[in-house]
Image: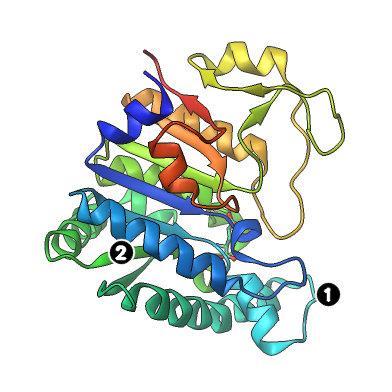
């Protein structure tokens, strides 16, 4: 299987957009990216794909909207920023998708939600109902109610939990790199892109895992954790650079760089 096959064969897809993809270098929300992304999603939906978006960016959007507290590391300020930014984020997503006649619905999950049978049943039902009715769910962690100890903490893992919950055919993680490299490509010009991964333990022996960058909380480590979750459920996962022009279309046609995680 290659990336194009994985997209062609998938009906239900979860797509995760990282903070680094959503934010410009100056920390403001990249509405041009959102517009372009909404256009590509609308094409996929027109081709009978069902989509769920996991969107990071609440904290970045909060900083950008308020233009203060940027340096405050205190959890209360960060949670307050997420409360402010989540509204901004959804306002921008709503505007972007509305141009294509697509309504969006917001779901905010916590780690605990995924451990309760009754809650997961309701989360699942809401997702199915929204998608069946042609509404696009946009999910984030409920950052304002989660303290450090009980957070999922990164949207790579949240996307994987959502993918499992909604029983998807494919998970796509959009980050600011083209995929998994043998070393950090920003520091090592000789680093090579690994196009396909079928064994995470084997992969870990051959790559060096650096730390996270700019606005994101994840980094390659949480992407591999998400991939491990997907391997356990037999769901393929694609890691690609969300900031690249027409990325969804180019992945579908097999012309974009990416790493595909799958067993076959
Ligand atoms: N939930 C966080 C936010 O919206 C982002 C988590 C992540 O970057 O993975 O700011």
**Quick one: quadrant of the C terminus?**
top left
Q: Residue at x 62, y 74 (%)?
A: 29
In which quadrant of this rendering is ligand 1 seen? bottom right
Q: Nearer the viewer, residue 142 or 44?
A: 44
Distance from label 1 to label 2 (Cα)?
32 Å
Specify whether 90 is left or right of 194: left
**Colour pattern of the rendering:** rainbow
- Whether residue 139 is visible, yes or no, is no
Residue picked out by circle 2: 137
Mark nearest the camera among 1 and 2 is: 2
Q: Could you say where residue 138 lies in the image, as x and y percent from the top left?
A: 37, 65
User: Could you tell me which secondary element the residue under label 2 belongs to?
Assistant: strand
Q: Earlier in the sequence, mark 1 or mark 2?
A: 1
**Label total for image:** 2
Residue 71: mark in rendering: 1
Q: Residue at x 52, y 18 (%)?
A: 197
- Whether residue 250 is visible, yes or no, is yes
Residue 154: mark in rendering: none
Quadrant assignment, res 225: top right
Q: Could you say where residue 97 lies in the image, as x and y percent from the top left?
A: 35, 72
Q: Residue at x 54, y 80 (%)?
A: 83
Q: Could you say where residue 82 lies in the image, as x and y percent from the top left?
A: 58, 75
Specify whether 222 is left or right of 41: right
User: Could you tell me which secondary element the residue under label 1 belongs to?
Assistant: loop
Q: Nearer the viewer, residue 85 or 1?
A: 1
Against 95, residue 211 (above or below) is above
Q: Residue at x 58, y 14 (%)?
A: 201
Q: Residues within 10 Å of mark 2 (few under 14, many from 20)?
A: many
Q: Residues within 10 Å of mark 1 (few under 14, many from 20)?
A: few
Against 133, residue 200 (above or below) is above
Against 75, residue 124 (above or below) is above
């Amino acid at each position: 299987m290659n990336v194009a096959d994985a997209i062609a064969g998938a009906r239900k897809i979860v797509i995760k957009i990282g903070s680094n993809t959503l934010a410009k270098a100056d920390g403001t929300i990249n509405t041009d990216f959102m517009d372009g992304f909404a256009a590509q999603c609308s094409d996929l939906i027109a081709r009978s794909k069902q989509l769920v978006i996991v969107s990071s960016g609440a904290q970045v959007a909060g900083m950008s909207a308020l233009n203060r507290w940027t340096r405050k590391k205190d959890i209360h300020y960060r949670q307050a920023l997420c409360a402010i930014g989540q509204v901004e984020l959804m306002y921008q997503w709503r505007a972007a998708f509305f141009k294509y006649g697509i309504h969006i619905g917001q779901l905010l999950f916590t780690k605990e939600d995924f451990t309760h049978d009754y809650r997961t049943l309701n989360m699942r039902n809401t997702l199915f109902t929204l998608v069946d009715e042609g509404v696009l769910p946009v999910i984030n962690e409920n950052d304002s109610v989660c303290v450090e100890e009980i957070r999922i903490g990164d949207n790579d893992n949240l996307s994987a939990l959502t993918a499992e919950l909604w029983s998807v055919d494919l998970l796509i993680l959009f980050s600011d790199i083209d995929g998994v490299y043998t070393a950090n490509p920003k520091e090592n010009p000789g680093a090579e892109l690994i196009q396909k991964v079928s064994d995470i333990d084997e992969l870990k022996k051959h790559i060096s895992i650096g730390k996270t960058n700019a606005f994101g909380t994840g980094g390659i480590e949480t992407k591999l954790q998400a991939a491990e979750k997907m391997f356990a459920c037999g769901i393929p996962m694609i890691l690609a650079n969300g900031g690249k022009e027409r990325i969804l279309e180019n992945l579908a046609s097999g012309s974009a760089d990416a790493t595909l995680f799958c067993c076959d």
